[in-house]
Image: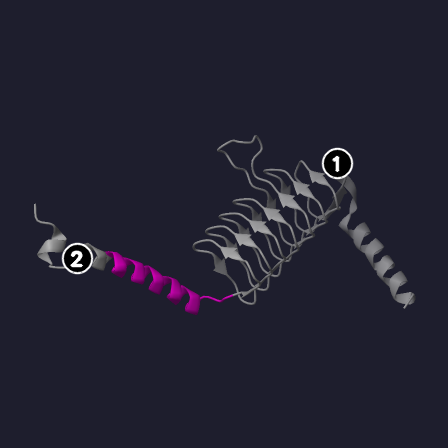
Amino acid sequence: MTSTFSLLNLPAPFFNRRSKFLNYLNIEIQRIIMPQPKMGKGVIVGANVQFGKEVIIWNYVVIGDNTKIGDGTCIGSFCDIGKNVIIGKNCNIQAHVTISNECVIGNNVFIAPNSSLLNDKYPKSSFLTAPIVKDNVTIGGGVTVLPGVVLGENSVIGGGSVVTKDVPPRKVIAGVPAKEVMTKEEYEAKREKFIRSRQKRR
C-alpha cells in the first residue's frame, strides 16, 4: 500500500517538523498578543495559562494548565498553583501558598504565607471540591481551607486557622476549627486603633 507521504514525494519527518513549527508559532503569537507577567527565576507555567495586565510572579512558582490570573495580581515565591484555577484582579498571594486544582479566588484577595486551599475531602478520591474565595477576603498566615468551603465577601481568616465550613460575608473567624470571633466592622475598628497607636510612636 502506497502511503500519502510517498504520493506527495515528501518524507514523514517534513510533516513532523511542520507540526512542531506551527505549534511554536501559535505559542509565539499568544505570547505577543497576550499580556506577559514580570517573572522571577525558576518559574514553571503550564499550557494555556492566561495572565492579565501587570501581573508579577516571583521566584520558583509553579502554575498549572488552564489557569487564569487577573490584572495587577502578585504571586509570591515558592507558590504552587494548580490546574484550572481562577485568580481575580489585584490579589496579593504571598510566599509558600498552595492553591489546589479548580480553586476560584475573587478580586482584591490577600493570602498570607504558608496557607493552603485544599480540594480533596477524602484523599485519594476522584471527586474534587475546591474552595471558593470571594472578593476582598483576607487570609492570615498558615491557614488551611478545607475542600468545598466558601469564604464570603470581606471575610477575614485569622492566622493558623483551619476552616472547615463556609464563612458568611463580613465575618472574622479564627481557631482550630475556625469559629466566628467578631464582625468585619469590629475588626476594622481594632485595626484603625492599632494603626493610630503605632503612628503616635513615630
Residue stretch rendered in magenta on the structure:
16-36
CB-based contact (under 8 Å), mark 2 and mark 1? no
Q: Toward the viewer: 98 or 77?
A: 77
Main secondary-structure element of the magenta-colored stretch: helix
Q: Locate residue 107, reporting x and y percent.
A: 61, 57
Residue 20 as seen in the image, left or right of residue 89: left
Residue 46 as seen in the image, left or right of residue 80: left
- Amino acid bearing label 2: Pro
- Amino acid bearing label 1: Val
Within 10 Å of disc 2 (Cα), the crowding (few <14, some 14-19, many 20+) is few
Q: Locate residue 156, reporting x and y percent.
A: 72, 48
Q: Toward the viewer: 30 or 156?
A: 30
The answer to if 52 sits in the magenta stretch is no
Looking at the rendered structure, the secondary structure element under dot 2 is loop
Q: Toward the viewer: 54 or 114?
A: 114
Q: Which quadrant of the structure image shows residue 196? A: bottom right
The extreme right residue here reads: 201
Looking at the image, is mark 2 or mark 1 nearer the viewer? Answer: 2
Q: Which residue lies under the disc numbered 1?
A: 176
Residue at position x 59%, y 42% in the image: 131
Q: CA distance from mark 2 to mark 1?
A: 65 Å
The answer to if 18 sits in the magenta stretch is yes
N-terminal-most mark, 2 or 1: 2
Within 10 Å of disc 1 (Cα), the crowding (few <14, some 14-19, many 20+) is few
Q: Which residue lies under the disc numbered 2?
A: 11
Give the number of the disc on residue 100.
Answer: none
Residue 67 as seen in the image, left or right of residue 115: left
Q: Quadrant of the C terminus?
A: bottom right
Looking at the rendered structure, the secondary structure element under dot 1 is loop
Q: Locate residue 37, reporting x and y percent.
A: 53, 65
Q: Quadrant of the N terminus?
A: top left
